[in-house]
């Protein structure tokens, strides 16, 4: 019986980890003064002063970032760098 409970808990734990795959968050970084898009749930501590999300796609996160007042607008060069990194 203990083996069954242990196997069930492992299955549940692995399912919750994979549930977060493919999600995006918008994170405000106080050190750089910018907002970044990350793929892991942010911990709000230190230089990270806010996190917004999760979003189902990077495009949704980009749209959300453009509507957040605390996020400065990206320059054309930054947009190119970001699009090239994907």
Image (spheres, rainbow, N blue to C red):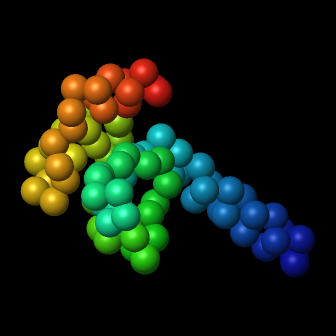
Residue found at x 37% / y 64%:
31
Residue found at x 87% / y 78%:
2
Does residue 56 appear to the left or right of 2 in the view shown?
A: left
Q: Is residue 12 above or below residue 23?
A: below
60 vs 2, nearest the viewer: 60
Q: Is residue 4 above or below residue 72?
A: below
**Residue 81 screen position, x and y as percent:** 38, 27
Q: What count of labels does the image hold?
A: 0
Asked if one can make out residue 27 in the rendered structure from this viewpoint, the answer is no
Question: Which quarter of the rendered picture does the N terminus lie within?
Answer: bottom right
Residue found at x 35% / y 36%:
57
Residue found at x 29% / y 52%:
35
Q: Is residue 49 above or below residue 18?
A: below
**Residue 60 screen position, x and y as percent:** 26, 38
Q: Which image quadrant is residue 43 in? A: bottom left
Question: Which quarter of the rendered picture does the C terminus lie within?
Answer: top left
60 vs 6, nearest the viewer: 60
Q: Which image quadrant is residue 16 in? A: bottom right
Q: Which image quadrant is residue 52 in? A: bottom left
Asked if one can make out residue 43 in the rendered structure from this viewpoint, the answer is yes
């Amino acid at each position: 019986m203990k083996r069954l409970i242990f196997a069930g808990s492992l299955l549940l734990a692995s399912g919750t980890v994979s549930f977060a795959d493919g999600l995006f968050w918008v994170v405000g970084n106080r050190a750089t003064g910018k907002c970044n898009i990350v793929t892991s749930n942010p911990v709000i501590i230190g230089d990270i002063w806010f996190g917004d999300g999760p979003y189902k796609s990077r495009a949704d996160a980009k749209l959300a970032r453009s509507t957040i007042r605390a996020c400065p607008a990206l320059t054309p060069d930054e947009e190119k760098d970001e699009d090239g990194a994907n």
